[in-house]
Every structure is written in structure tokens, then in C-alpha cells.
């Protein structure tokens, strides 16, 4: 459908590293260069408004999404995306209407989607083996079609962050106050939930269910330690997310390392977090 | 009338919180809603803000421009993550500026935020992190945020809570002068009767239903207060206080105009 070969050739010419010689490495690098800034940007809101559990629920809906694909015999990659978005929007709708606390609502959905996924998967042993892929993820096996989709998602998501960053801050701080002061709260909540669900579902394929939340929260948490303003936090988060992803990919491909890419990326990001925590600790006590 | 509540009833899970409340708030006046804990004061405000479902009607007069009234709201509690990196200027700009904060604050917006802070006498807070503000400072930042709406209707929930007595007096006087210069209608919930007597122009005494309504001196009678709070409740007698001062004596300054 799309031939990305010229892009990959250009990448090799610009970055003539031995590590990047296999095509799948350049594919993975491109995918990560798109995915990491997206998760890091959305992570700013996830960290500030304590939405880690929400992201976790979406990532765990991956099983059910794949199972749905198998039942309806459609490409599990796409059924996963659609299912993830539906679950994300359903959680927001339930939160807005229910008197239950937010984490209870998420917990209920979390349990339901995991149980549904396991129920379907348990019927078929072959499917169970396929599921391993989603537990640990594999960025090195990403396909061109998915990379192209990531490009579109990147543009949409960054446009959203540009248009809605300030108002999301308002809504996140206090929805009732934002509503009274004429911010369209529901629109922002649903759009944010839909987009973060898409990002999470794609990140699951790269990082695996177990580590996807880390892609969202670790750069954001480190950024929060370093930034002194809401504007700066965005850039810190993107920078840490991107550098961790690229460094993690390169390190994981070295002969001395030979580690899983997703896990290596998160370890590098955690290193940044430790440094940021030290910086925050040193700054404490100083007048701000 | 700026706001008219007509037979407003709110019930949650079978418990009646507000029972056929009919009351009003005069245009450009300062209306105080008083009553004991659990009287439904905050619920009445939330109904006005459209945050809870109610039966009956709430009529709000059109705004200065002829459109729907613009509302500024100062909540009693503003729970937020105090470790969040967010400056007071960003806090005041987030609802106004289109350009994302990660591309910086526009000069014109910064100037506007500065003016707003000056109007609530909090110029020094401009570059402070929001999480480092004290209770009184936070209240001013929230008031500045509400004033940014150029409100026809300013709604405050317990403005004197969480602030010491002196801070409460200063805040009351600030509101009084802002109301005179901006011409908004003010509605507040308060449990501080001294504040109410000397600051409000209109009182709604509420305990699930309206016990009494009218100017403070006529409304807050011994009978009303007993009905509201039980026995032994009365206002502080000004003559008994040193220098005839009470906690929030804004009316004293107004006296020559009367």
C-alpha cells in the first residue's frame, strides 16, 4: 500500500551506523520516533491527573481486542484499536454519570475486559501462544502499514496537544470550575480518552501490555521533577521519552546487551527518572 | 432580580436536600446564603451552576451584553496536586490563550494576568508555583480566575473558610470594592454570621427550605437564628465589642453614602 523504502534509505544515509543496517532496525527507529513523543506528550496529563490506572485498563483491553478480532475474523491489530477506543470512551461515559469513584469505575471495566479476553483465549491453545506477543510486545516486527498509521496518528495527536493543552489543564485541575468558566469539558474528556486509547493500543504492540503504562508515566514523572512550569513539563517529557526510546533501541541491539527493546527503553527512562529525582531533591530547600 | 429560585427541590437517593426553595438574589447586590451544616447551602449553589439535578426552576437574568449571564465561580475547596509544575500566570492564562503553554505565554496575556492579580492585590504571586500558595493566596488566585470571566454573577462558596480573621476581613473589603467597580451580582455561601451581617445586602436563611429572606438586619432575628441553629444563637452585639468592631465591618465605611 505504502512504500516507505525511500525513507529508510534516507535514514541510513543520514545515520550510517552499523546497528541500523538491517531494515527492521530503521523501521523500529522510525516507529519509536513517532510513538515515544506521543506517549510522552499524553503522559503529561496522565501524570498530572493521575490517570495511570486508566491507561493500564486500556492496555489490558488488548487481550479482549485481539480475542474480538479472532471471533469476528478480522485483523487483530485493528480490532484491538477499535476495542481499545470503545473501552476508553465507555470508561469516561461511566465516570461522568456514575456516583462511584473514578478508580472503582476503571477497576470494573479493567476486570471485565481482562476476563473477556482470557475467556476467549482459554478456548484455543494456539491463540494463547499468540498472546505472548502482546504481553511483551515487539517493536522489531512492526509493519509498514502500522508505521504509516502512526504517522497520521502523530499529526492528529500533536494537533490535539497544541489546540487543547491549556484547556486540558483547566479540565484536569477542576472539571466543575472549567465547566462554569465556559470550557467544553465533555468534548475534551472524550477526545483525550479516544486518542490516548489509540496510542496505548499501538504502544502495546511495541512495548507489551506489561510495560506500556511505563512509556506514559516514566517520562512524565521525570519531567515533573525537572520542570517549573506547565509549559516546560511538556518539553522535558518529550525529550526524555524520545531519548530513552532511541537509546534503548540502540543499546538493546548491541552484542553485549542483546536485551528486549521495550524493557531496555523503560530502563533508560528510569535512569532519567532517578537523575530527575536527585535534581528535585537537591532543589528542595532552595527558595523557589 | 439577578437570580430567582422557584420551588427548587433536590433529592439524592431518596433524601431531600433542598425542599421547594423559593428565593431570589437582587441585581448587583451581595446575597449571602446562611444555615447550619447540611442545610443544603452548597447544593443550592451547585444547582445554580448546573452541577446537580433539581426540580423546579432557576431563572438567571441576562448578562450585560444581552446574552446569557457570565458566571465566575470561587469554590470552597480546590483540591489539586500541589506538586504539579504550574505557575500562577499559567493558571490565569490557561482558559484564555489559544497558543499552547508549551509555546510560551503571550505578552498580552501575561499583561492581562498581571492586571488581574493587581485587582485582587496579589501582584507578587505572578511567578510563584500554584502549589506553593497559602490558603489566602490560593483564594485570591481563584478570585482572579473568576474575575477573568468578567462575570455578571460571582458565586463564592465559603469565602472566609480556611483564612484567618484578618485575612477574612481584607478579602471581604476587596470583594466589596470589586463589586462597586465591576458591578457584578454576588452570591455567597457563608457560615460566618459576622461577615454576613456587615457585608451582605440580602440574606437567604436556609435549612433545607427557606426559613427567612431579606435584608440582614430584618432577617437575622433571634427567632430566625434559633430556627436555623437551635438555642442560644445570636449575633455578636457590636456595642459589646472593643471599638465597636466586628470581624468584617465593611458597612461602616459605606455609612456616609447612605
Image (spheres, coloured by chain):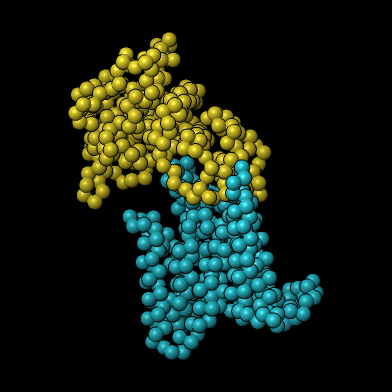
Q: Is residue A8 visible?
A: yes
Quarter where residue A234 is shown: bottom right
Q: Is residue B155 visible?
A: no
Where is the C terminus of chain A found, in terms of image quarters?
top right
Q: Position of residue A173 (x, y in %)?
A: 48, 48
Residue in front for this viewpoint, A127 or B122: B122
Res B49 quadrant in image = top left
- Which residue shows up at 47% across the image and 41% down it? A181
Q: What is the letter of the yellow chain?
A: B
The tint of chain A in the picture is cyan
Picture residue at 40% right of the left edge, 32% below the top? B160
Asked if residue B46 lies left or right of residue A152, the reply is left
Residue A41 x, y percent position in the rendering:
59, 59
Q: Is residue A282 left or right of residue A81?
A: right
For image coordinates 43% across by 10% down, the residue present is: B256
Q: Position of residue A17 (x, y in %)?
A: 78, 76
At a point 24% along the width and 51% down the height, the residue shown is: B13
Location of residue A258 by image quarter:
bottom right
Q: Is residue B148 above or below residue A81?
A: above
- Report x, y in % for residue A9: 77, 76
Of residues A91 and B255, the one nearer the viewer is B255
Residue A62 vertical placement versus B115 (above, below): below
> Is residue B15 shown above or below B227?
below
Which image quarter is the N terminus of chain A in?
bottom right
Residue B168 sits above or below residue A278 on the image: above
Q: How many marks?
A: 0
Task: Give the camera-side residue of A44 and B16.
Answer: A44
Amino acid at each position: 500500500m505504502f512504500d516507505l523504502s525511500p525513507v529508510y534509505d534516507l535514514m541510513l544515509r543520514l545515520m550510517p551506523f552499523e546497528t541500523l543496517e538491517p531494515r527492521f532496525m530503521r523501521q523500529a527507529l522510525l516507529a519509536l520516533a513517532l510513538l515515544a513523543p506521543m506517549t510522552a506528550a499524553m503522559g503529561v496529563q496522565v501524570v498530572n491527573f493521575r490517570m495511570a490506572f486508566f491507561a493500564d485498563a486500556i492496555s489490558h483491553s488488548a487481550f479482549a481486542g485481539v480475542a474480538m478480532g479472532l471471533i469476528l475474523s478480522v485483523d487483530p491489530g485493528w480490532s484491538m484499536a477499535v476495542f481499545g477506543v470503545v473501552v476508553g470512551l465507555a470508561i469516561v461515559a461511566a465516570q461522568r454519570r456514575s456516583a462511584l469513584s473514578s478508580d472503582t469505575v476503571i477497576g470494573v471495566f479493567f476486570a471485565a475486559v481482562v476476563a473477556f479476553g482470557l475467556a476467549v483465549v482459554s478456548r484455543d491453545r494456539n491463540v494463547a501462544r499468540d498472546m505472548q506477543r502482546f504481553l511483551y510486545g515487539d517493536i522489531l516486527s512492526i509493519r509498514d502499514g502500522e508505521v504509516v498509521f502512526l504517522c497520521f496518528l502523530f499529526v492528529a495527536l500533536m494537533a490535539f496537544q497544541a489546540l487543547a493543552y491549556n484547556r486540558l489543564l483547566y479540565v484536569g485541575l477542576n472539571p466543575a470550575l472549567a465547566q462554569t468558566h465556559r470550557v467544553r469539558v465533555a468534548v475534551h474528556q472524550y477526545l483525550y480518552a479516544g486518542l490516548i486509547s489509540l496510542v496505548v493500543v499501538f504502544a502495546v504492540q511495541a512495548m507489551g501490555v506489561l510495560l506500556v503504562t511505563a512509556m506514559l508515566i516514566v517520562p512524565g514523572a521525570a519531567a515533573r521533577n525537572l520542570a517549573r512550569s506547565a509549559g516546560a513539563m511538556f518539553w522535558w517529557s518529550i525529550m526524555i521519552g524520545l531519548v530513552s526510546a532511541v537509546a534503548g533501541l540502540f543499546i538493546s541491539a548491541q552484542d553485549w546487551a542483546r536485551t528486549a527493546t521495550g524493557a531496555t527503553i523503560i530502563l533508560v527512562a528510569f535512569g532519567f527518572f532517578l537523575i530527575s529525582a536527585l535534581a528535585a531533591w537537591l532543589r528542595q530547600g532552595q527558595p523557589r | 432580580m439577578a437570580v430567582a429560585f422557584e420551588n427548587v427541590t433536590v433529592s439524592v437517593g431518596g433524601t431531600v436536600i433542598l425542599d421547594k426553595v423559593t428565593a431570589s438574589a437582587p441585581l448587583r447586590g451581595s446575597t449571602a446564603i446562611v444555615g447550619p451544616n447540611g442545610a443544603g447551602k452548597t447544593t443550592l449553589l451547585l444547582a445554580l451552576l448546573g452541577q446537580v439535578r433539581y426540580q423546579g426552576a432557576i431563572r438567571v437574568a441576562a448578562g450585560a451584553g444581552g446574552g446569557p449571564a457570565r458566571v465566575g465561580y470561587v469554590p470552597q475547596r480546590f483540591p489539586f496536586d500541589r506538586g504539579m509544575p504550574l505557575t500562577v500566570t499559567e493558571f490565569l492564562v490557561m482558559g484564555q490563550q489559544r497558543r499552547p503553554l508549551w509555546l510560551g505565554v503571550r505578552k498580552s496575556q501575561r499583561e492581562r494576568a498581571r492586571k488581574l492579580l493587581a485587582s485582587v492585590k496579589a501582584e507578587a504571586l505572578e511567578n510563584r508555583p500554584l502549589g506553593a500558595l497559602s490558603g489566602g493566596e490560593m483564594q485570591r488566585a481563584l478570585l482572579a480566575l473568576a474575575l477573568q470571566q468578567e462575570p455578571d454573577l460571582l458565586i463564592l462558596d465559603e469565602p472566609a473558610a480556611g483564612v484567618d480573621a484578618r485575612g477574612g476581613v481584607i478579602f471581604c473589603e476587596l470583594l466589596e470594592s470589586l463589586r462597586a467597580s465591576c458591578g457584578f451580582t454576588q452570591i455567597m455561601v457563608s457560615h460566618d454570621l459576622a461577615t454576613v451581617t456587615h457585608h451582605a445586602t440580602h440574606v437567604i436563611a436556609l435549612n433545607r427550605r427557606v426559613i427567612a429572606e431579606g435584608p440582614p438586619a430584618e432577617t437575622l432575628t433571634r427567632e430566625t437564628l434559633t430556627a436555623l441553629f437551635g438555642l442560644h444563637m445570636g449575633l455578636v452585639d457590636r456595642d459589646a465589642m472593643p471599638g465597636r468592631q466586628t470581624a468584617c465591618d465593611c458597612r461602616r465605611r459605606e455609612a456616609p453614602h447612605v
